[in-house]
């Protein structure tokens, strides 16, 4: 494994986008609305290429029974499960509006249920929702069908139901196994519970089990996180997502319940990250990119080796780049050269659907420059290289003229050993993969013009 020094981690501990899209969602505008989205759906339906490519579907379930203090997601805290029944009826309306514009039976190769807590839904609710999707779309055999799981809301029988419904990938929210850290973030879940669920998932036959971890939480220390890392190595999930906690209490009300003095210092966060990289490497995990790790035989690691890695609003994926339908409150979609986002409150979401309208309230129609830069950034984020000639032929540009200032900025990153630039293109080094966001940020025209980057999480 490439040794990443704390000095280098500290140097690039800056704020920046995660590039699940380009331009990023903070660039969406209210001027983009339902009619723009309907136009994009219509163009997809009329395009032979559009119709031939499978869709990806994201469904946002906003409900949670209890509040996790670190959470920055769009969620609704409630113990009234009947609210989910109402929500499902509105999801059906939204699905029906989509099929009215793009047709029934469109192929789907990727589904992801996120939240909130998707497993807040009852067994009947989960069955109904998957039934809605199957009756309106055609799920492709061998696709990725995943769901985020709060370990506190499931048992072995519920996992068996998820498999029966067609889910083949699970993502368990762990964050940290330390009891004191769990208490500080108001999320108590014994390690034994997670170990038992992962064992059940394996016996049921899920293709992949993911575990989410967060470093930088209150009460964490490098030593306490070492213990969590050792437990994760013993658990041996197929994939690991390691996120840095971004403390933004001015934006996320839940985070105001976290005691500032309990947060680890920046030096401790850097130490936790460095030790995590070493622990995962020692345990045999492949570094996929950014904050994702996978066992060598996992499909994500295989896609990385074969140059087939893709990236969308759900993160890294093995599925080819495709249009994304976002369903539910605040859900984000991508159709053609547009991005769209639904209303962020239930009241607005329900109101628009009651009017018979798709609940899109903001979005973006990409310019030619946006599309060129998206191609560059996604090549860097997914393949770790950018070949100039194919880019020039695809977009009829001269790379050294078009990106003159960006190539000049790359010289510093090249001196740091993070990237190599030649006449043929640029290549991210083994060391550079750990700082791939910093490399991609060079080509972000909006970010270069906007020095107020504090709204983003730290890239390390």
Image (cartoon, rainbow, N blue to C red):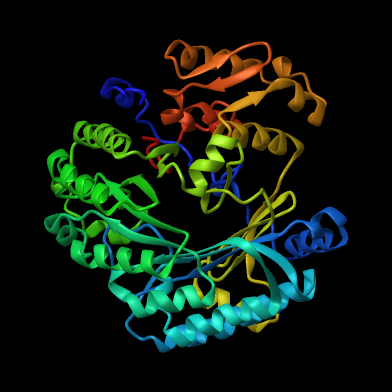
Relative image position of residue 124 (x, y in whole percent): 47, 87
* Residue positioned 28% across, 63% down in the render: 68
Q: Is residue 286 above or below residue 117?
A: above
Determine if residue 248 is in view: yes
Foreground residue, 350 or 288?
288
Does 337 sit above or below residue 437?
Answer: below
- The percent position of residue 56, horizontal first and vertical second, equals 63, 60
Give the side of residue 60 with respect to residue 228, left or right.
right
Number of numbered tags placed on the structure image: 0
Residue 357 seen from this side: no
Q: In the image, is residue 294 above or below residue 80? A: above
Residue 271 percent location from the top left of the image: 22, 32
Residue at 45% over, 35% down: 452
Position in image of residue 415 (x %, y %): 45, 10
Q: Quadrant of the C terminus?
A: top left
Residues 207 and 442: in front is 207
Image quadrant containing the N terminus: top left
* Quarter of the rendering containing residue 54: bottom right
Up-down: is 418 above or below 219?
above
**Corner quadrant of residue 255:** bottom left
Q: Nearer the viewer, residue 372 or 113?
A: 113
Q: In the image shown, does 226 or 402 lie closer to the viewer?
A: 226
Q: Residue at x 60, y 35 (%)?
A: 307
């Amino acid at each position: 494994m490439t040794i990443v020094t704390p000095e280098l981690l500290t140097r690039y501990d800056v704020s920046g986008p995660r590039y699940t899209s380009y331009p990023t969602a903070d660039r969406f505008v209210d001027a983009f609305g339902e009619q723009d989205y309907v136009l994009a759906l219509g163009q997809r339906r009329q395009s032979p290429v559009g119709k031939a490519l499978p869709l990806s579907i994201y469904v946002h379930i906003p409900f949670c029974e209890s509040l996790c203090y670190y959470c920055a997601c769009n969620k609704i805290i409630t113990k009234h499960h009947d609210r989910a029944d109402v929500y499902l009826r509105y999801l059906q309306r939204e699905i029906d509006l989509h099929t009215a514009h793009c047709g029934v039976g469109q192929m789907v190769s990727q589904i992801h249920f996120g939240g909130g807590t998707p497993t807040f839904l009852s067994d009947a609710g989960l069955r109904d929702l998957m039934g809605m999707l199957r009756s309106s779309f055609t799920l492709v055999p061998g696709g990725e069908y995943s769901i985020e799981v709060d370990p506190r809301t499931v048992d072995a029988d519920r996992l068996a139901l998820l498999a029966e419904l067609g889910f083949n990938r699970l993502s368990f929210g762990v964050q940290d196994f330390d009891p004191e850290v769990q208490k500080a973030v108001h999320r108590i879940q014994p390690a034994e519970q997670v170990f038992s669920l992962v064992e059940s998932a394996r016996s049921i036959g899920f293709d992949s089990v993911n575990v989410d971890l967060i470093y930088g939480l209150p009460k964490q220390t490098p030593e306490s996180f070492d213990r969590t890392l050792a437990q994760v190595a013993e658990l041996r999930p197929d994939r690991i997502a390691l996120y840095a906690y971004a403390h933004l209490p001015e934006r996320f009300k839940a985070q105001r319940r976290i005691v500032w003095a309990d947060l680890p210092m920046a030096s401790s966060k850097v130490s936790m990250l460095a030790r995590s990289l070493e622990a995962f490497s020692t345990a045999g995990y492949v570094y996929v990119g950014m904050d994702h790790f996978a066992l060598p035989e996992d499909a994500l690691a295989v896609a990385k080796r074969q140059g087939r890695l893709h990236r969308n609003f759900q993160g890294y994926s093995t599925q080819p780049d495709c249009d994304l339908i976002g369903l539910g409150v605040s859900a984000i979609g991508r159709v053609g050269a547009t991005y769209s986002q639904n209303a962020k409150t239930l009241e607005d979401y329900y109101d628009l659907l009651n009017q018979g309208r798709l609940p899109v309230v903001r979005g973006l129609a990409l310019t030619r420059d946006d599309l060129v830069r998206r191609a560059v950034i996604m090549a860097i984020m997914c393949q770790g290289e950018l070949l100039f000639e194919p880019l020039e032929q695809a977009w009829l540009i001269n790379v050294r003229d078009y990106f003159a200032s960006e190539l000049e900025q790359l010289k510093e990153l090249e001196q740091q050993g993070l990237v190599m630039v030649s006449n043929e293109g640029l290549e991210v080094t083994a060391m550079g993969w750990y700082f791939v966001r910093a490399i991609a940020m060079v080509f972000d025209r909006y970010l270069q013009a906007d020095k107020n980057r504090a709204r983003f999480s730290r890239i390390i």
